[in-house]
Image (cartoon, rainbow, N blue to C red):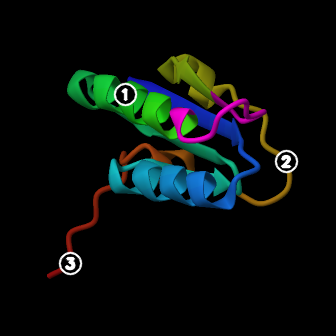
Amino acid sequence: MIIIVLYDISNDKIRLKLSKYLLRIGLYRIQKSVFIGEIQAPKRKHLEQHITRLLAEEEESENSIVVVPVSEGNINALWRFGREMNMDLYLDRIQTLIL
């Protein structure tokens, strides 16, 4: 499943923990608070639990995290402006063999 994770987190510590975790599970940062990538079912449940724990670290926060499942067709139809984004790279469609 392809997901896009967007967040608005004011707490630096929680924001850093989340971004490091998203990179560790194989997502790619496409903007400062936006990540994209493919995630398998076991990691999906773990992601949900991890986000819940992170948000529980700060009482009465205004923090928000949104996880959006995206179909292959919708990824190809994304509107992109500014910096070039190679979606094939972000979705691990490009494989390089170095000899």
Between marks 3 and 2, how big is the CA–CA gap? 32 Å
Q: Is residue 9 above or below residue 16?
A: above
Which residue occupies the extreme front position in the image? 59
Q: Is residue 9 above or below residue 6?
A: below
- Quadrant of the snapshot with the N terminus: top left
Q: Is residue 4 left or right of residue 34?
A: left
Which numbered mark, 2 or 1, is in the foreground of this view?
1
**Type of the residue with mark 2:** Phe
Residues shaded magenta: 56-65
Report x, y in % for residue 10: 76, 49
Considering depth in this image, is 66 or 38 the residue closer to the camera? 66
Q: Position of 6 compared to 38: left or right?
A: right
Instruction: Determine if the magenta segment contains residue 34.
Output: no
Residue 52 visible here: yes
Q: Amino acid at mark 3?
A: Ile
Q: Residue drawn 65% across and 34% down?
A: 59
Q: Main secondary structure of the magenta part?
A: loop
Question: What whole-number distance in Å separates the C-alpha atoms at marks 1 and 3?
Answer: 37 Å
Element assignment for label 2: loop
Residue at horizontal 36 percent and vertical 53 percent from the top: 94
> Counting residues from the N terminus, which is met first, the one under dot 2 or under dot 1?
1
Q: Answer with the quarter of the image where residue 49 lies.
A: top left
Task: Pick whichever of labels 1 and 3 is earlier in the sequence.
Answer: 1
From mark 2 to mark 1, how far is it between C-alphas? Answer: 33 Å
Residue 81, disc: 2
Direction left: furthest residue: 99
Residue of label 1: 49
User: Mark 3 = which residue?
Assistant: 98
Q: Position of residue 17 (x, y in %)?
A: 49, 56
